[in-house]
Image (cartoon, rainbow, N blue to C red):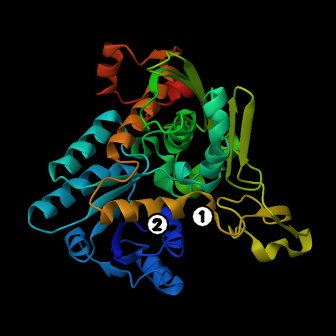
Amino acid sequence: METLKVGFIGSGFIARFLATAFQHVRGIELVGVLKRSTSEDISAFARQIGVGECKVYSTIKELCQNCDTVAILSPNYARLETVQEIVDIVKSGVELKGLICEKPLGRTVAEATKLVELAEEIQLPTAYMENQIHMKVVKNAIIQTARVQELMGPLTMVRSSEEHAGPHNPWFWDPTKQGGGALSDLACHSIAVSWFMLTPTGKPLDYLKPVSVNAETALLKWGSGIYRDQLREKMGIDYAKTPAEDFATGMVTFKNPETGFLSKAQFTNSWMYDKQGLRILMEALGPGYAFEINSLKSPLEVFIADSAADALADAETALEKATSSRGLIPVQPNEADLFGYTDEFVEVRDAFLAGRDALLNWRYGLEITKLCQAAYMSAERRCTIDLTDVNIQKELESYTSLIAQGRGAEVLY
């Protein structure tokens, strides 16, 4: 079996998660990582779990020369510069099989559009990493309801949320670097997976056409005194000056181009979920049927008493972004597989070795970026954004939200 040799640009939290997923994918190897402050940790971790030798390379060119696929996992604000350098390297004669980019593709529509253009300039297959669409529970729910969808009609409403207590890294809290707050970080997942589930079985990903977005953003936790002080002390980010939203909710309306039927995708995302840890919750409703997905439901529960809790203080061994190390704790024994990272890389491996785009390519990532930016626009203007309006589409091409500009106090306070 041919092996896809992957190099990481980025060695933070998501890099470790993706490396973990490699354990369950045949024909894929983590061969290198770009030198950064935590790259030695990822290199050692990859060797420890047996997913590749993962050498540390000093330059992007050296990395590209020693792998055949580059996964761009670097901070959002560095993506454009990174891809431009890769394009120049490929033009100089270095061969690659494909480019992977972790969500979001861009902080703005303009950034995402430029990334698509750069990849197409060198005609490389691309993969946009949206893991929730690849979750086994999502795929199995669709399989289980395929026959009833055929008889009764497709889903009409999907509610989706991803919530946790906040990001790990300081740059993620900075809206000028990240591109926003919880909406930019998490709503991209919820909107994408809802669109996917609403799409009638057998139709392409973009079959349903987005016609409108209505959204709200708020600062409900991290803007208050005690939490604002904690954030400033721990992350060096002052939300009294440049806040981002820690809560976002909204509705995307889609139109079936053949029947004219309108379906709804409701998203709710936050950085203020202080229960056991990260929670993904989805509820899908159709005519005469429904299904629900809750990532906190697990066949394994562990109880830690107060007297023993200090031994696990600040550990995330049970769940990603866990906020507690005591009490009754649901434990997910394989989060990388649960959240879809394993199946995501199986699909990417097959696509790139065959010389084609992944199921979710960068043009798809661009469409998700447009919907997220339309949600910011809706929240700012306090109105529904009509995506069928050519003038709105033109505005989105150069739009940067006030929050991403560092002017979040104007809309959040």
Q: Quadrant of the N terminus?
A: bottom left
Which quadrant of the structure image shows residue 348? bottom left
Mark 1 or mark 2: which comes first in sequence?
A: 2
Give above or below for 84 relative to 354: above
One can see residue 180 in this view: yes
For the residue marked with disc 1, what is the amino acid? Asp
Please give the residue where the numbered disc 2 appears in the rendered image: 15
Q: Position of residue 227 (x, y in %)?
A: 67, 46
Q: Quadrant of the C terminus?
A: top right
For the residue marked with disc 2, what is the amino acid? Ala
Instruction: Say left or right for 118 vs 262.
Output: left
Query: Real-space Cα distance between discs 1 and 2?
Result: 15 Å
Q: Nearer the viewer, residue 367 or 405?
A: 367
The residue at the point 52 percent across, 39 percent down is 196
Q: Nearer the viewer, residue 262 or 6?
A: 262
| SS at badge 2 | helix
Please give the residue where the numbered disc 1 appears in the rendered image: 337
